[in-house]
Image (cartoon, rainbow, N blue to C red):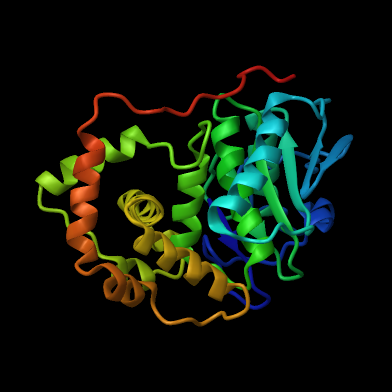
């Protein structure tokens, strides 16, 4: 889940009150009375830190740099760069890792009142800090792969359209030996939706600007478009990669839906056929957490 902050934005899931990384430690008192069950003292993890390339993990419990979870994120950085033909950035992506869900929820409610509770968030603050907030859980690997992908994209691109941001994060959150593993749950649900009359519409996704506008079906469709463009044909892959390249320094490129239609013809029909083909094989690769126990 990504939350985008601006200097003068009203309350919302994608735009809310200002927050600036470490400065959030001092903001808790500001929101006294606004949070639900606000504890007397709420703070970000700060006791331990690990730096590995762009990744900077801050936690209140020890976690070895060699831990499979961190090694997976280090490898993910390379895979995102290679798969999307993006240059490796040195801009750090902070990960504030709470030891348990209770402490994470307490911090979140006190510091960002009004945000719905989610397992994890990525926030790009007005001063351009890239920060992930989450707690250790059975879904920690999936959550960190998703949110860290947001951070990597925002470190490399001038801007990232919302639906592409989420589509690529959904794409890379699925663990596997190589990028592009199939989200079996999404494929089944998209196949069922298609049987019930659903049709894809990239142009509609392009009009979404706030996270609260995105429904669960939109995340599935964003994942499907991303997977389709990267794997259906050399032409569809080139359209997406060229578009991402343009986003590196142009915040307002022409619509991707128009570019894709020009390149492949009838993208909606081809996506439906692509999803049907994915649904046909009996086996898919599922996401598996590294561990459900705090190291």
Instruction: Place residue 154 in its image quadrant.
Output: bottom right
- At x 45%, y 70%, the residue is 209
92 or 270, which is in the foreground? 270
Name the spot of residue 177 as percent of width and height, x first: 53, 31
From the viewer's perspective, tell me whether residue 43 is left or right of residue 216: right
Residue 143 vertical position relative to residue 110 in the rendered view, above or below: above
| Figure check: 48 above or below 291 | below
> Please, which residue is most extreme toward the right here?
47
Choose between 181 and 58: the one closer to the eye: 181
Numbered-mark total: 0
Task: Locate the C terminus by quadrant.
Answer: top right
Question: Foreground: 202 or 20?
Answer: 202
Q: Quadrant of residue 215?
A: bottom left
- Judge left or right: residue 281 versus residue 50: left
The answer to which of 137 and 188 lies nearer the viewer is 188
Q: Percent from the top left, x then y, of residue 157?
A: 62, 68
Location of residue 142 in the rendering, given as x and y in whole percent from the top left corner: 54, 35
Is residue 245 visible in the rendered structure shown here? yes
Judge whether residue 161 can be spotted in this image. no
Give the quadrant of residue 189: top left
Q: Is residue 108 above or below residue 239?
A: above
Residue sitting at x 86%, y 40% = 46
Residue at point 19% right, 67% down? Answer: 266
């Amino acid at each position: 889940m990504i939350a985008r902050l601006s200097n003068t934005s009203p309350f919302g899931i994608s735009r809310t009150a200002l927050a600036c990384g470490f400065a959030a430690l001092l903001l808790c008192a500001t929101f006294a009375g606004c949070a639900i069950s606000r504890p007397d003292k709420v703070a970000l993890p700060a006791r331990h830190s690990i730096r590995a390339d762009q990744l900077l993990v801050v936690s209140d419990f020890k976690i070895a740099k060699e831990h499979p979870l961190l090694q997976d994120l280090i490898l993910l950085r390379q895979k995102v760069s290679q798969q999307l033909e993006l240059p490796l950035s040195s801009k750090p992506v902070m990960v504030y890792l709470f030891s348990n869900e209770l402490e994470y929820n307490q911090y979140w409610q006190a510091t960002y009142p009004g945000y719905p509770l989610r397992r994890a968030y990525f926030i790009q603050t007005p001063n351009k800090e890239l920060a992930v907030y989450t707690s250790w859980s059975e879904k920690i690997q999936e959550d960190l792969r998703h949110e860290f992908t947001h951070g990597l994209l925002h470190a490399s691109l001038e801007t990232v359209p919302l639906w592409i941001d989420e589509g690529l994060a959904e794409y890379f959150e699925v663990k596997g030996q190589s990028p592009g593993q199939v989200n079996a749950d999404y494929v089944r649900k998209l196949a069922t939706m298609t049987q019930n009359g659903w049709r894809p519409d990239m142009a509609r996704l392009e009009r979404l600007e706030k996270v609260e506008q995105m429904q669960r079906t939109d995340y599935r469709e964003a994942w499907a478009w991303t997977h389709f463009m990267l794997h259906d044909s050399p032409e569809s892959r080139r359209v997406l990669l060229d578009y991402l390249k343009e986003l590196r320094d142009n915040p307002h490129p022409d619509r991707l839906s128009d570019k894709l239609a020009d390149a492949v013809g009838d993208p909606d029909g081809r996506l439906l056929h692509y999803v049907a083909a994915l649904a046909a094989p009996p086996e898919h690769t599922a996401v598996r957490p590294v561990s459900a126990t705090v190291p």
